[in-house]
Image (tube, rainbow, N blue to C red):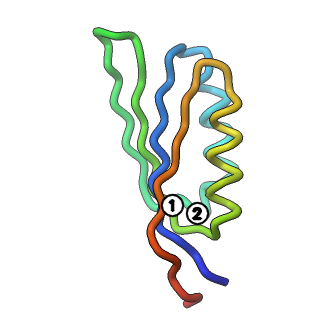
């Protein structure tokens, strides 16, 4: 199965969404290579980048679930497909 490297960029505008966001990310932890979170206290937001190695459908599903959370914006950037290892 082909996989892609992707970066999902997430902006959280309300800390009440963080617990649900973390639960969703935990569902996909087998695909997550790394994660970086930066609180921007002056603006009251959190910026999170999640790096994945996953099939296209998995990346789209994760990005979609995150984007449906209230006060959360998520966008994915994809690499070219990699053949199965």
> Tag 2: Cα neighbours inside 10 Å, few (<14), some, or many (≥20)?
some
Circle 1 sits in a helix, a strand or a loop, which is it?
Answer: strand
- Label 2 sits on residue: 31
Give the percent coordinates (x, y) of residue 51.
45, 56
Q: Is residue 3 left or right of residue 51?
A: right
Contact between marks 1 and 2 (CB within 8 A): the answer is: yes
Give the percent coordinates (x, y) of residue 55.
64, 70
Residue at the location (51% across, 50% down)? 76
**Above or below — where is 13 with respect to 1?**
above
Q: Examine the image and state in which quarter residue 43 appears.
A: top left
Give the percent coordinates (x, y) of residue 81.
52, 78
If the image is split into quadrants, where does the N terminus sit?
bottom right
Q: CA distance from mark 1 to mark 2?
A: 5 Å
Residue at the location (52% across, 42% down)? 75
**Above or below — where is 40 with respect to 24?**
above
- Label 1 sits on residue: 52
Q: Is residue 46 left or right of residue 82?
A: left
Q: Earlier in the sequence, mark 1 or mark 2?
A: 2
Give the percent coordinates (x, y) of residue 67.
64, 34
Q: Examine the image and state in which quarter residue 65 appears.
A: top right
**Above or below — where is 67 with respect to 84?**
above
């Amino acid at each position: 199965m082909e996989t892609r490297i992707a970066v999902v960029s997430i902006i959280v505008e309300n800390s009440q969404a963080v617990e649900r966001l973390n639960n969703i990310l935990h569902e996909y932890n087998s695909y997550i290579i790394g994660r970086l979170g930066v609180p921007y206290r002056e603006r009251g937001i959190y910026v999170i980048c999640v790096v994945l190695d996953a099939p296209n459908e998995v990346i789209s599903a994760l990005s979609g679930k995150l984007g449906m959370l209230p006060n959360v914006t998520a966008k994915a950037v994809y690499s070219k497909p990699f053949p199965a290892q």
